[in-house]
Image (cartoon, rainbow, N blue to C red):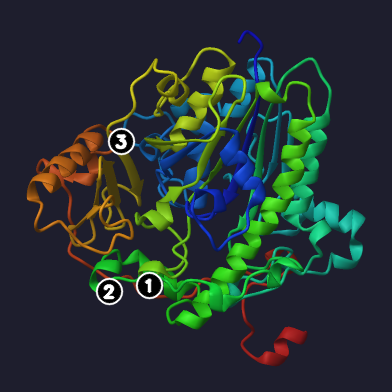
Amino acid sequence: MDTQPNILYVMTDQQRFDTIAALGNKDIYTPNFDRLVRRGLTFNNAYSPCPVCVAARYTIRTGCAPLKTRVFSNGIDAPAPGQAETMTERCGPYLASEMSARGYRTFGIGKFHSNPWNEELGYQSHLHSEELYGSPERRRGDAYASFIAEHYPAYDFVEGLMGERTEMYYMPQMSPMPAHCTVESWAADRAVEHIRCEEDRPFFGLLSFIGPHPPLAPPIPFNRMYDPDRMPNPVRGELEIDHMDEQIPWMNYGIWAEDINDAHARVLRARYYGEISYIDQCLGRVLDAVEAREDADNTIICFFADHGDHMGDHSAWQKESFFDVSCRIPFLLSWPARLAADVRRDDLVSLTDLYAIATGASGDVILRDGCDVLGVVEGNASAREALFGMYGSPGTPRFKIMVRSGDWKYIYLANGGREQLFNVALDPNEIQQRASDNPTVVDRLKGLAIGALENKAGEAALEGGSLRAFQYEERPHRRVYQFDRSRGVVGFPDRPEDALA
């Protein structure tokens, strides 16, 4: 097709791969995600190369893996020896800048989690809605918080516009906002406005929902949509395997989730599903706007998440591990004018591939660290044989690397030099540790991991021709406090009465 397609990227935060009804979850109601499934391709084996917010987002906007972005967590590392100083010098122009240069009308709406928070990302229209406001300036600069202050001033006193955090992170909540003025509804409405805009140029847009990231606070009536006693209990294995990665118990403690029982977990999953069903409803308005366009069939929609959430599986909460529930993501791609409808594919796909999808569809493909997914689908490119994930700075005990290839997943944890191996075809819940009885597979995948690190950016994770190991240490546990610093709140008071001052 000669005409450049419109391209709409839609993402959620912390949405597991197994949360769409049309893909087999019989406990959840997602009619609009189901629409997207029917509209095009579903990639069953899609992964976040670093399953945490900031790292995943830099991969999306650069098409580069963590070794090049230097983002291995929610912070940014210094460049490796020989690397350029700035992100765009190392990686090239951000995706929005590239699409603008190709003649696209570009817009970005929602959560971007950049560093700094107001970094120029290349969108001609850029509307932030971040989760936390570190200063009064940041709250004033947040498009959603400003929208509430202007249009719904009665709610402007609310410190946590998306719900309470800190010790309430994994406590069931109800949104402090009615459904029509939550951040998800605001984001969907702004996206609809941009999609309806009639211009000669095609559009490239990113709609980035904050949910279903905790706090789990769906608005009425989505807060009572699911009966907790109809929810499944978490899937747990032996604790020495589930918690081999010490990041998991460390994070559990940090967000007051170290002792959540099954009944509490079912309530949390009910609220999590309520959040997803609410986002699904907001998504429906966006899909309707696309379908109302004359060029709807020449509009690419790609839906994905930055990472998942353990939701109690493996006795874990939050993300940042390489269990599938943390790092495997939903990934739906549709283009009615060129791609088949309602098809499932098993190719290994990564967030690094999003740069190539957009550039390939709009003209000349730029791969960077990604794979030419459109080329693979159309038989013009080779699929990847192995997929890598990394977390934590190379050369530190926090470093870990995942290799997914065929039916197998290998995970190496530098803290203690620990190894995990799972056959994800036979054991999709990743309960059975297979490293000791499959040494040949371990050696093969470990060799791939070493090969991926044999460069200036990764060599700190190697020692003596193998993966570097550190004597095992458990980090001191500490709580994570996330209050509204824009209102001068930094923690709990020393004396209860001081909160009233």
Q: Which residue is mark 1?
A: 315
Which residue was labeled with disc 3? 457
* Image location (x, y in percent) of residue 321: 37, 57
Tags 2 and 1 touching, CB below 8 Å: yes
Q: Residue 202, percent across and down?
A: 72, 20
Which mark sits nearer the N-terminus, 1 or 3?
1
| Residue plotted at (56% across, 32% down) | 40
Q: Quadrant of the C terminus?
A: bottom right
Indicate which disc residue 372 carries: none
Label 1 sits on a secondary structure element that is helix
Q: Secondary structure at mark 2?
A: helix
Q: Name the side, left or right, on which 314 lies relative to 26.
A: left
Query: In the rendered structure, which amino acid carries the disc numbered 1?
Result: Ser
Q: Residues under labels 2 and 1: Cα distance?
A: 8 Å
The residue lying at 84 percent from left, 57 percent from top is: 148
Q: Earlier in the sequence, mark 3 or mark 2?
A: 2
Badge 1 crowding class, 10 Å Cα cut-off, few under 14, some 14 to 19, many 20 or more, is: many
In the figure, 115 relative to 195: above or below?
A: below
